[in-house]
Image (cartoon, coloured by chain):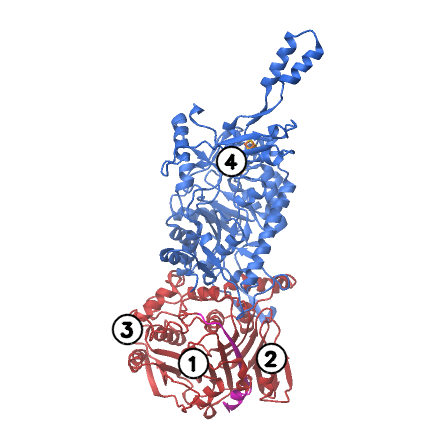
Amino acid sequence: MSNYLPPEYLVRIDEGRCRRCGECVRGCGFGTLAFAHGAWKDAMSVFKHDQGDLQQVLARIKENVTDRVVADHHKCVQCHYCVSHCPEGAVSVQPNPLAYRGNHHWRPEYLKNIWRQANTGGMVLTGAGNDKAYFSYFDHMVLDACQVTNPSIDPLREPMELRTYLGARPDGLELEPGPGPRGAVLKTRLAPAVRLDTPLVFPAMSYGAISLNAQKALARAAKACGVVMNTGEGGMHEDLYPFADWMIVQVASGRFGVNPGYLRRGAAVEIKIGQGAKPGIGGHLPGEKVDEGVSQTRMIPVGSDALSPAPHHDIYSIEDLSQLIYALKEATEYSKPVSVKIGAVHNVAAIASGVARAGADIITVDGFRGGTGATPLAIRDHVGIPVEMALAAVDDRLRQEGIRNHVSLVVSGGIRHSGDVAKAIALGADAVALGTAALIAMGCRLCQKCYTGNCSWGITTQRPHLTRRLDPDRAAENLTNLIRGWSLELKEILGALGLNAVESLRGSRLRLRGVGLPESDLRVLGIKNAGV
Amino acid sequence: MVPAAASCTLCHAARLPRTSAAAATISPAGRNRCRAVAEHAGRPGALKKVGEEMREGMVRIPSGCAISGIMSTKGIRFNGEAITRSIACMHERSNGLGGGFAAYGIYPEYRDLYALHLMYETPQARVDTEENLRRHFNVAQSELIPTRPLPQIGEAPLLWRYFVRPVREDGADGLWEDDDYVTAFVMTVNREVPGAFVFSSGKNMGVFKGVGYPEDIARYYRLEEYEGYMWVAHGRFPTNTPGWWGGAHPLGVLDWSVVHNGEISSYGVNKRYLEMFGYCLELQTDTEVIAYLFDLLHRRHGIPLDLVCRALAPPFWKAIDRMDDRERELYTALRRVYGSAMLNGPFSVIVAFQGAMVGLNDRIKLRPMVTGKKGDLILMGSEESAIRVIAGDLDEVGSIRAGEMAVARLEEGVVV
Ligand code: SF4
Ligand code: SF4
């Protein structure tokens, strides 16, 4: 039936360059490429029939057998593994130039999905984040810089501080006179917090959705950079225990891998209510990705689908959430902050306020560009709101209610570079999570096929021959470099703004201006238009 | 628990006891509070002032400045000539678009009453303000602030002063501190009464300021006729010409006054932080932010003064990491809790209130600040010359280090 669907990409092998090393054939996770065995068969038949002259046979083989690499174009997802790894540069992948009858409304992607569904009767699945051409507010906000009246600060010559703490803060400190420093003794006992050396974190990506090697890389990088990664809902593999201080352990609706030891091991506990890529939808890890390791860690049988329900079955209202928050605090003896992750939806400000009042110490707001291992396309592309708007609304609401300090705000969902990070912080975020960017640093080409478990880059797969190729040390180095690069850029941005500590940018909407935004958007973002 | 409830609303607090958890957690936004105050004061929603878009409060105006302060730690009172000489010596640091003074101990005969200094731009402004004033206060004295006409001083608003005591007919008795009540009133008038501006509201002290060079402002207000034990002064170099008297410095609330040289690059953060605690930042100036931060941290949260300074210009993490456990815990807590109160960017500032004067420099000392001592006199200024012009042979002279502060206090037992 796939006849209905022309291939999306065409793989071309430059015959003149190809030296038949097989790098691309072995490399493709999607089974697109193969040596043309038909040609061999042909040669063998020649040999059988022409018993006599060996010389002649060899000549025939030489003539007829071209042991070519051939592509089943239908299978190609344009992940570029072959292109990146061919030592001769002989492989190229192009979008199929096949022209559809032009139609602005019925664009080819919609036709193809209809054909697919007409064939299968199923949902169209996808991975990664919303790729539709929705308006980007990040791209229509610009940052300020100092000129004359206040000096900018040079991060190469002056200290520049990015350290950030995630956790609840009281409104004020209580001090009493005593023998402490400067004659004051601190009476307030501060709630536990996660310390970050730079306001960046790796968001939840579970073992199961991503490979153990990918998680190892994230954990090593988190430790090296003084930030945290997040187990996601898949539990914590033994190999990661040494990194537990740099890991947030997640409790999601499936409760996979959750036990007291797990909760106590992490730097913080996160309750996952929702995810930007699929708010209102549970998790789905196909059985093919549940191998021995995943099975052990998640505490489920090998090969069984790991389906986490859409809601937590013990949370049907905000007071239930509060109970779970305090149950987790009890279980960890109030020694860890509890975070709650929500997807950015229409009423996100009120929800966040409720979550803050329910006792959360950290709120993670995941925007509609956030990535995922697997989700129905219809949800990914059409549910949720931009993180910029969600963040502005949440920060505003928490301030209006005088409780902004009681929680830390982490935002995620399509953060592409340090400029986005700085803008998010200026809008009000304490820290920013980079998920997709982290995967890209490890090799991901955003082919969006994570749900197939075939990731050629060894990231979102559990197939040993694929995961093996992701070297956790090298990937950790890539991640560390990325965090370092962004942090350096953040320091430059802060310096240009005349600031030497990141908390002086947090919520500073005055340092943002909108370019080309209508009044209504400016109002929600709480920023002025450029020029005023 | 430190109360989170705001001081900005008369009505809200009248209904909710300040100490109740409800007041601490469900108090509405600063902005809403202000509106509530406005309605209470009988001026619903009227937009502020005679319509000028370029004055303080409408736009943010970066300025450079000169500051200076003198205090007698023995509480000995002296007239305004010394401080005028000091600030005049830094003439180049201002551009004639703003000068002002705060003087402490000048109204001993009214020491228990709040001295309100007002600017009126229209006769109606005075009528409206006085109507509100009499509803909320007993007015013991109401008079023109004496001035001397000068060619250097352009058109001035009507300058009036009142000595008042709060009355509590609205049932707010006992729920409000007098100070909070006065603060709320000041914010209400400044925000909602067109053409009226309260520029001084402390006890036994007064602010005198206007558009002009500071030495001319001093003569205009006849400061040589006042005697105080502590004086601070400000000469301003704004980058545009708002020409509004209320925009001159010092700024402050109650007996707090702040003079400041620099530009706080973290203004937006500080402003939004303060708004969460119910402050209405009307003037969009750094000085106002500094005054309110001192008010919040010191008066409302009870943080000792030198730790307030350490919260506003905190040590770097590197230094904190090297401290012993107790110190590290304290400074980490200060930075975690008051991170949004940190003043980032270049500044030197003198904060004065009854009995004390504090000089503070930014974290990396991007603005000058010199201190000196001569007998019982403590002097502070943007330049050494501003100090030496008052007392040539100083006993001590020094520079405030980055992030450090200098405090001058009245000696024990001195009553002013
Ligand atoms: S799926 Fe990836 S590796 Fe396979 S042919 Fe296509 S681009 Fe190459
Ligand atoms: S993680 Fe792998 S499968 Fe997923 S988008 Fe990236 S390259 Fe494709």
Label 1: which secondary element: loop
Query: Which residue bears the numbered disc 3?
Result: B42
Q: What element carries label 2?
A: strand
Ligand 1 lies in which image quarter?
top right
Give the chain ID for the red colour.
Answer: B
Can you identify the residue that label 2 sits on? B370
- For the image, the number of numbered tags is 4
Q: What element carries label 4?
A: helix
Taking the image as shown, residue A163 lies to the left or right of residue B203, namely right
Bounds of the magenta segment: B60-85
- Residue that mark 1 sits on: B202
The answer to whether the residues at label 2 and label 1 have Cβ atoms under 8 Å apart is no
Whether disc 2's CB lies below 8 Å from ligand 2 is answered: no
Give x and y (percent) for residue A143: 49, 59
- The subunit letter for the residue under badge 2 reads B
Q: In this view, does A141 lie above or below B86?
A: above
- On whether ligand 2 comes within 8 Å of the CB at mark 3, the answer is no
Name the amino acid type tagged 4: Cys
- Do the residues bearing badges 2 and 4 touch, measured as CB atoms within 8 Å? no
Horizontal side of residue B11 vs B237, given as left or right? left
4 vs 3, front mark: 4
Chain identifier, blue in the render:
A
Q: Amino acid under label 2?
A: Val
Mark 2 is surrounded, within 10 Å at the Cα level, by few (under 14), some (14 to 19) or many (20 or more) other residues, namely many
Ligand 2 within 8 Å of disc 4? The answer is: yes
Residue assigned mark 4: A450
The question of residue A293 being in magenta is answered with no
Give the label, 1 or 3, closer to the camera. 3
Chain holding disc 1: B
Numbered disc 4: what chain? A
What amino acid is at disc 3? Answer: Gly
